[in-house]
Amino acid sequence: MSSLRSTVPVLHPEIMMKFFIVALLSSLPAVGVTADSAIFCSPKPATAEHCEDVTLQCHLDPPQDATNMMVEWRHGHNNDIVHLYRDRKDNPAEQKEPFEGRTSLFREGLTKGNLSLKLSTVALSDAGRYRCSIHTDKLQKSCYVNLTVGESKVIGSHDPVTVRVGYDVILPCHLEPPFDVRTLTVKWTRNKTVVHVSRHGNDYLNDQDENFRNRTSLFHEEMINGNISLKLINVTELDAGSYTCNVPCLQSQVRRGFINLTVEPADQTETKQSGGTDFSTGAITGIVVGVIAVIVAVVVLWMNRRKITTDCARPNTTGHNGQNREGSQEDNAEDNAEDNAEDNAEDNAEDNAEGNNAEDRDEGNGENIGMLNLRNVN
């Protein structure tokens, strides 16, 4: 008996404890989705515009860790594999080609049962029904979600945009129906030269034409509503021309909008603003001709008046009633004789008056002298 006991190995207490734990764990149900767990997809269809990113909602309820499960997304009637997560990693080799590089799961969300799929740069062909599935050794559960993809058009301006040299201008362009273009590429060109480029909400101006440096900008805060208008400051005459706003990712029939910019010289614009009327070249020419005509008329009138005044100042060289030059000379001679006679008569009368006055003065002086002599004698 003693020899038999010596041949039976004695198990160490720690080893016995390990065997006991393993046996206990093996008797427990597998960790994962239980029969009471459910998988839910969004009851409302997901909507996205072309080239947008979208999330297709799918989750476990109650939440459970799905990192050790197989998560599978399929699309359409052909059940094309969109995304496959297995053995704690993605398996892109199983993915259908149109979805390569455009799908991902939320890794941190898997621990809480979030099985949602992010689909980037949505294409029109992505529209349709998607199936979200989980697989374990003992069960498989699925739900469905629909994706609707809209198609927007790029709208420019039918009417030309007019601006004055030195002013700022906005070239209007937007997407209709509107959607968020912050994650897309927006490109502005003029005659095939790069005016402005924006990608994922950031400006990329390395290829920008030198003429537009530091003069262009987009309204980034409004791009969420599809506004991709361009602001151009300090406009010059060289800026005139046809501009194109383009969203290259769009697969719609209208991916470009066109805007014509007309630049007016500063002097023409100032004339229009001050007078309220846009004078054409013909109107200006008519005004100049009219001013010249008025000046010529004034000069002619002045010369005629001067001639009349000069004629009036000249002596009359013709007699009355058709008399000849000799008759007028005789009349002049007679007039002169009469004038001379009258002048002589007047001069004689004046001389006589002066003589009488002198005599009177002499008599008076004599009387005065006599009176003085008498006074002296006395």
Image (cartoon, grey):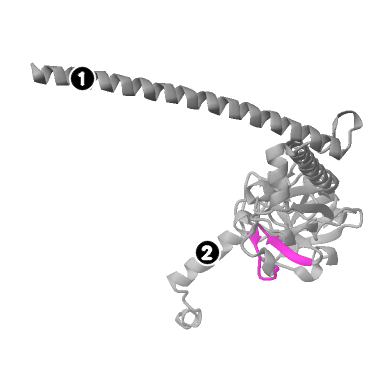
From the viewer's perspective, is 26 left or right of 152? left
Q: Amino acid at mark 2?
A: Phe
Q: Residue furthest left?
A: 378
- Mark 2 lies on residue: 20
- Few, some or many residues within 10 Å of mark 1 (<14, 14–19, 20+): few
Residues 281 and 300: in front is: 300
Q: Is residue 227 visible?
A: no
Disc 2 secondary structure class? helix
Residues 142 and 200: in front is: 200
Magenta segment range?
193-209
Q: Is residue 207 magenta?
A: yes
Of callouts 2 and 1, the N-terminal one: 2
Tell me residue 12's x, y (percent).
44, 74
Residue at (87% x, 54% y) in the render: 252
Residues 122 and 42: in front is: 122
Residue at (75% x, 46% y) in the render: 179
Q: Is residue 62 magenta?
A: no
Q: Amino acid at mark 1?
A: Gly
Residue at (81% x, 68% y) in the render: 94
Q: How many marks?
A: 2
Tell me residue 303's x, y (percent).
77, 42
Tell me residue 6's x, y (percent).
46, 82
Position of the C terminus, as image quadrant, is top left
- Mark 1 lies on residue: 370
Figure quadrant of residue 103? bottom right
Disc 1 secondary structure class? helix
